Image: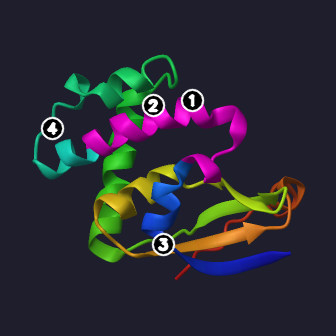
Amino acid sequence: MIIYKIMNTDDVFNNFDEYCIPEKIVRLNRFKNCFLDFLKYIDSGKKDYKSTDYFNYMNGRHKRKSRKILEEVKIYKSIKKDGLINPIDMYVINNKAKIVRGYRRLMGLHHLKRKDLPCRIFDSIEDYRRLKPSVRWK
């Protein structure tokens, strides 16, 4: 089953560790810090992304990091202009919602000070994998 819910962006962001998959907390906290700085860098109008901590974070994680970063810039600018198109995907484990997809969108919404965080909450990771969501929010 899928529940569509609007959550508060600040609540999820401020309790970030509670919404992270436990095995990913260390990596995601590092991501969180450098990605928020990266969003500020984008807003400043600078384009030399290779000088950012986020580029260094991506080094070794993606073969085509420059292309990946340009895609993320495009997504952030789209969220800034049009709002969120795809909701954050979560699943329930031990009666707690965990983010499975959408950390960058969460950071973008938080950085833009948007209050509403559209979410799709699945009963389990198995439901999420079985249904392979592709439905857009709008």
Cα distance in 3D space between marks 1 and 3: 28 Å
Q: Magenta region: which residues?
A: 17-38
Outermost residue toward the left in this view = 45
Is the Cβ of the residue at disc 2 closer than 8 Å to that at disc 3?
A: no
Identify whether 27 is placed above or below 85.
above
What's the residue type where badge 2 is placed?
Arg
The numbered mark at residue 26 is 1
* Lower sequence index among marks 1 and 3: 1
Is the Cβ of the residue at disc 4 closer than 8 Å to that at disc 1?
A: no
Cα distance in 3D space between marks 2 and 3: 26 Å
What's the residue type where badge 4 is placed?
Lys
x and y percent of residue 10 in the render?
Answer: 42, 65
In the rendered image, the quadrant that contains the N terminus is bottom right
Q: Quadrant of residue 22?
A: top right
Cα distance in 3D space between marks 4 and 1: 28 Å
Q: Secondary structure at mark 4?
A: loop
Cα distance in 3D space between marks 2 and 1: 7 Å
The chief SS type of the magenta part is helix
* Lower sequence index among marks 2 and 4: 2
Q: Does 35 lie within the magenta span? A: yes
Is the Cβ of the residue at disc 3 closer than 8 Å to that at disc 4?
A: no
What's the residue type where badge 3 is placed?
Ile
* Lower sequence index among marks 3 and 4: 4
Residue drawn 28% across the image and 67% down it: 80
Question: Badge 2 is on which residue?
Answer: 30
The numbered mark at residue 17 is none
The numbered mark at residue 85 is 3
Question: Badge 4 is on which residue?
Answer: 47
Is the Cβ of the residue at disc 2 closer than 8 Å to that at disc 4?
A: no
The nearer-to-camera label among 1 and 3 is 1
Cα distance in 3D space between marks 2 and 4: 22 Å
